[in-house]
Image: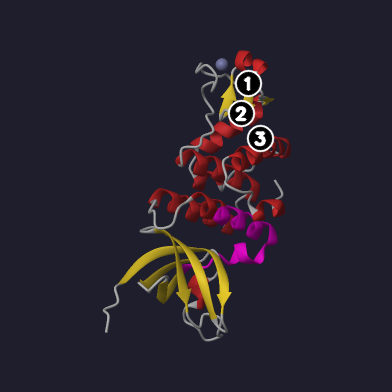
Amino acid sequence: MRRVRAYRVSSLAIRHRNLGEADRIVVLYTRERGKLSAVAKGVRRTRSKLAGGLQLFSHARVQLAAGRSLEIVTQAQPVHLFYHVREDLQRYAHASYAAELVDVMVEDQAADPALFDLLLSVLQGLDEEGDPPTLIQGFQLKVLGHLGHGPEVESCVGCGTRVGTRGAGFSVAEGGVMCERCGGSRTAARVTPAALQAMRDLVELPMEELARRRLTGSVREELGRLLQPFVEYRLPWPLRSAEFLEM
Ligand SMILES: [Zn+2]
């Protein structure tokens, strides 16, 4: 008998697919080991003790055993099930986007506790009364910034001078804000003072604070027009969940 190495992780279920009659392969984003795939045996049976903690978006303490190719879930103790996210279509769509964004941007088995905490906090914000578009736009900015993709929101990406809120441009390809001079000579969209200030706030403020804020309709729409292409430009392929977002 081969000795099976078991270990515990704090996990968020970000994707799953059915396997055979009653099993499921779950993709977990874990605080300790990053993204990993595991087999959850019998999880689709009504009496399965694993089901709650492995539902999409669930935060759980999970025990895993190393399998031959995939890990095997041996226990899943739910910490937070995010019922409100699951019951509300708009919140569900935004949570799906957040999970897919992390899924696409990270490699397997690369631990990143700060990114785990970001994903957990956006799910918490969505589960409480947070405004989904405000939270997701903040999440986009924070995740990309954390992974080193910007956008730069303070200094011109063309010449490095500090950019005020008036006359600023925003370049998807070059990675952030531009001063009036650089923005005029290259491909940069105009960005209104209100939208630029909002972008800076979303970068700066913690997710818990963003859960209490709501961007106005026009600022949210403008940020959507700037950030959606900015995110897509940095992804290997477009996110399936993006088409269900109402920003
Ligand atoms: Zn410049």
Confirm or deny contact between disc 2 and disc 3 (CB under 8 A).
no
- What is the crowding at mark 2: few (fewer than 14 residues within 10 Å), some, or many (at least 20)? many
Which segment did they paint magenta? 79-100
Q: Which residue is mark 2?
A: 196
Q: Residue at x 54, y 52 (%)?
A: 104
Q: Which mark is first along the chain, 1 or 3?
A: 1
Confirm or deny contact between disc 1 and disc 2 (CB under 8 A).
yes
Q: Which residue is mark 3?
A: 226
* Residue 81 at least partly seen: yes
Amino acid bearing label 2:
Leu
Q: Which color scheme does this rendered protein use?
A: secondary structure
Q: Is mark 3 within 8 Å of ligand 1?
A: no
- Residue 180 sits in which quadrant? top right
Q: Position of residue 99 (x, y in %)?
A: 55, 56
Q: CA distance from mark 1 to mark 2?
A: 8 Å
What main secondary structure does the magenta stretch of the protein show?
Answer: helix
Q: Which mark is first along the chain, 2 or 1?
A: 1
Confirm or deny contact between disc 3 and disc 1 (CB under 8 A).
no
Q: CA distance from mark 3 to mark 1?
A: 13 Å
The kind of secondary structure element at disc 1 is: loop
Q: Is residue 46 left or right of residue 246?
A: left
